[in-house]
Image (spheres, rainbow, N blue to C red):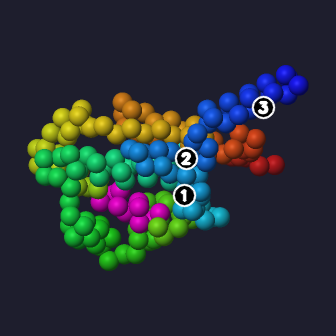
Amino acid sequence: MAVAAALVLGVSGLTACRTNVGSAATIDGHRVSESDVADYLTSSAQPLKSSDGTQSVAPKPFVVDILIRQRLYRKILQASPTGAPTSGQLTTLRRQYLAGSSTKATVERLGVKGYRPSFDSAIVDVQVLASLLNQEQQQGADLSAVLKKLRFPVSVNPRYGTWDTKNLRLVSDAKAGVPTFLRLQTTSSTQP
């Protein structure tokens, strides 16, 4: 009887330690569930490859990275000397960025394929926000001072990678986002 009680207590203790079950990340107080991440993917979602083709990021960690960047860039702009852009300014900048092309076509040119339209839109938002940050720097804004004062807590489920607080980036590998019980097949450049 004592052994059974200890097992029940031990199991309940384990579940109490894991309060973020089903969480992909918590970004500046905003919880992103694993189902939120999955909702951005289609069955044909492809890993994002680096420009030289030597590295790739699995679809789920890529989604988490974009969601982090979207919130991070907005927060940096909010704390910058010029402040956050209005929704009207963002709409104008978005139209300029798309230059008459569709959101889907624009992100596919970036190598992003197989994601839902809502995620394509998030990618365009990140590109526009990054452009605004670059403009601020070119106009002499000291964003390093903003970054020193910035409080931006991020915690990431290890399945999606780790958050590098020093460099403000998600670090993941090709296996990130894949359950540990699955083994990835490696592809060979030569086939029999």
Please say if 177 is above or below 110. Answer: above
Tag of residue 8: 3
- Per the image, the residue denoted by label 1 is 36
Between 33 and 4, the one nearer to me in the picture = 4
Q: Residue at x 34, y 47 (%)?
A: 72
Instruction: Describe the element under mark 2 as helix, strand or loop.
Output: strand
Q: Quadrant of residue 28?
A: top left
Q: Quadrant of residue 10?
A: top right
Residue 4 location (% of width, % of height): 85, 28
* Main secondary structure along the magenta-highlighted residues: helix
Residue contact between numbered discs 1 and 2, judged by CB atoms under 8 Å: yes
How far is the residue under mark 2 from the one under mark 3?
27 Å
Q: Residue at x 50, y 45 (%)?
A: 25
Q: Which residues are magenta?
A: 119-128
- Per the image, the residue denoted by label 2 is 24
Dot 3 amino acid type: Val
Residue contact between numbered discs 3 and 1, judged by CB atoms under 8 Å: no
Q: Earlier in the sequence, mark 1 or mark 2?
A: 2
Please say if 62 is above or below 91. Answer: above
Residue 171 location (% of width, % of height): 49, 37
